[in-house]
Amino acid sequence: MIRSELLQAMAKDNPELRAEEVEQVVDIFFDEIAQRLSEGGRVELRGFGAFSTRDRGARKGRNPRTGEAVDVPAKKVPYFKPGKEMRRVINDA
């Protein structure tokens, strides 16, 4: 599912909301998750899963085109761990 499909599904389930309001709700939802993760926090949605970040250390990489060694700096990467209910739904499907 892509963002536009999510917006359409939410608009269909909530006919009392205008398209702009549905889009605003989705924007706020994703912005809040991103903001919390950027602060080093964690977002847990019961039955769905938990979003967090993990530290990835600095390392030596290779430029695939030239084969030249490249320094890759340390960074944080987003991580999602599905909840028990999500795993059950996926595996029963």
Image (cartoon, grey):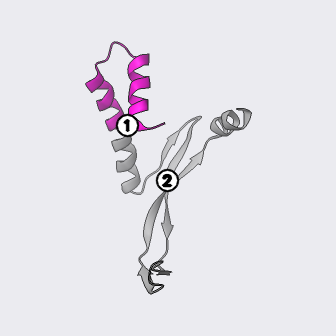
Q: Is residue 8 above or below residue 67?
A: above
Q: Is residue 27 above or below residue 14?
A: below
Amino acid type, residue under disc 2 in the picture: Ser
Q: CA distance from mark 1 to mark 2?
A: 15 Å
Residues rendered magenta in the picture: 1-29
Q: Which residue is mark 1?
A: 29
The residue shown at (72%, 38%) is 91
The residue shown at (44%, 84%) is 66
Q: Is residue 47 magenta?
A: no
Task: List x then y, in percent, for residue 37.
Answer: 41, 53
Residue at the far front in the pictured view: 65
Does dot 1 land on a helix, a strand or a loop? helix
Image quadrant assignment for residue 84:
top right
Task: List x then y, in percent, for residue 3.
Answer: 40, 37
Residue at the far bottom in the pictured view: 68
Q: Is residue 24 magenta?
A: yes
Image quadrant assignment for residue 49:
top right
